[in-house]
């Protein structure tokens, strides 16, 4: 399978995982805290909404980095954009994508999109108290993506320090721990206020 086809297949699985969680979000959930410090669920969904727009633009060869006007996020819009995103990358796409002053190979951008979508899908699930781990096969595919894309200079501004996990931990916990999140299973826990243990390095301007 070609590198781009592999990346799109990974993106498909990430979108499928996250869309299930988004389906459970209600307006009453928007003030809930998330693993992303200083972001409540409404703000995280707004970030995801902007990210899906940008990632869809990437299928045409360039991403506009100009700030977007903040709007109240509607989960239905996110669901529709998730479908449109996969459709965009299923068509003929350029070999490279320009993001600001960087020119990246297209499969790298798609794998990064899969990582972003799946991990924030987990964030949303934790915020609403859903016990929905990242599927092991998906996490196994995303772990080398995270390890190749996340530089130490990103720690503290976009990601927290890596969290220790047991040597025999499953791949979903290893992935989340590498990204500064506490991926230990939580059963029957609903987080409605206060900081959720997770990515303490993510601030309002971070793109993680």
Image: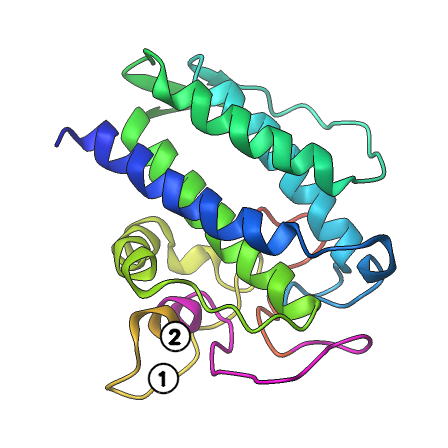
Query: Which residues lie in the magenta part?
Result: 175-196
Instruction: Name the secondary structure under disc 1.
Output: loop
Q: List the residue tagged with mark 1.
A: 165
Location of mark 2 (residue): 173
Where residue 78 appears, as percent x and y from the top left, is 66, 37
Task: Work out which quarter of the rendered image holds the N terminus and state it.
Answer: top left
C-alpha span from label 2 to label 1: 7 Å
- Residue 155's x, y, as percent? 49, 62
Q: Residue at x 42, y 49 (%)?
A: 115
| Mark 2 vs 1: CB contact within 8 A | yes
> Relative to 142, does residue 197 appear above or below in the rendering?
below
Is residue 56 left or right of 178 when viewed as pictured? right
Q: Is residue 39 visible?
A: yes
Query: Is residue 78 in the magenta section?
Result: no
Q: Secondary structure at mark 2?
A: helix
Q: Sequence order check: which comes first, mark 2 or mark 1? A: 1
Does residue 178 appear to the left or right of 200 in the view shown?
Answer: left
The front one of 133 and 207 is 133
């Amino acid at each position: 399978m070609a590198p781009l086809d592999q990346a799109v297949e990974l993106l498909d699985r990430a979108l499928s995982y996250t869309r299930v969680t988004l389906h459970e979000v209600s307006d009453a959930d928007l003030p809930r805290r998330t693993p992303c410090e200083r972001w409540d669920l409404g703000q995280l969904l707004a970030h995801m909404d902007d990210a899906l727009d940008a990632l869809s633009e990437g299928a045409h060869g360039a991403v506009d980095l100009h700030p977007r006007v903040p709007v109240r996020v509607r989960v239905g819009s996110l669901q529709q954009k998730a479908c449109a995103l996969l459709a965009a990358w299923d068509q003929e796409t350029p070999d490279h994508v320009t993001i600001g002053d960087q020119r990246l190979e297209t499969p790298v951008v798609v794998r990064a999109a899969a990582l972003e979508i799946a991990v924030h899908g987990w964030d949303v699930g934790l915020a609403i108290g859903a016990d929905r781990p990242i599927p092991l096969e998906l996490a196994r595919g995303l772990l080398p993506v995270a390890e190749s894309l996340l530089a130490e200079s990103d720690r503290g501004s976009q990601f927290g320090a890596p969290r220790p996990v047991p040597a025999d931990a499953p791949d979903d916990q290893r992935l989340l721990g590498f990204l500064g999140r506490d991926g230990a299973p939580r059963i029957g826990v609903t987080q409605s206020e206060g900081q959720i243990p997770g990515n303490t390095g993510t601030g309002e301007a971070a793109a993680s």
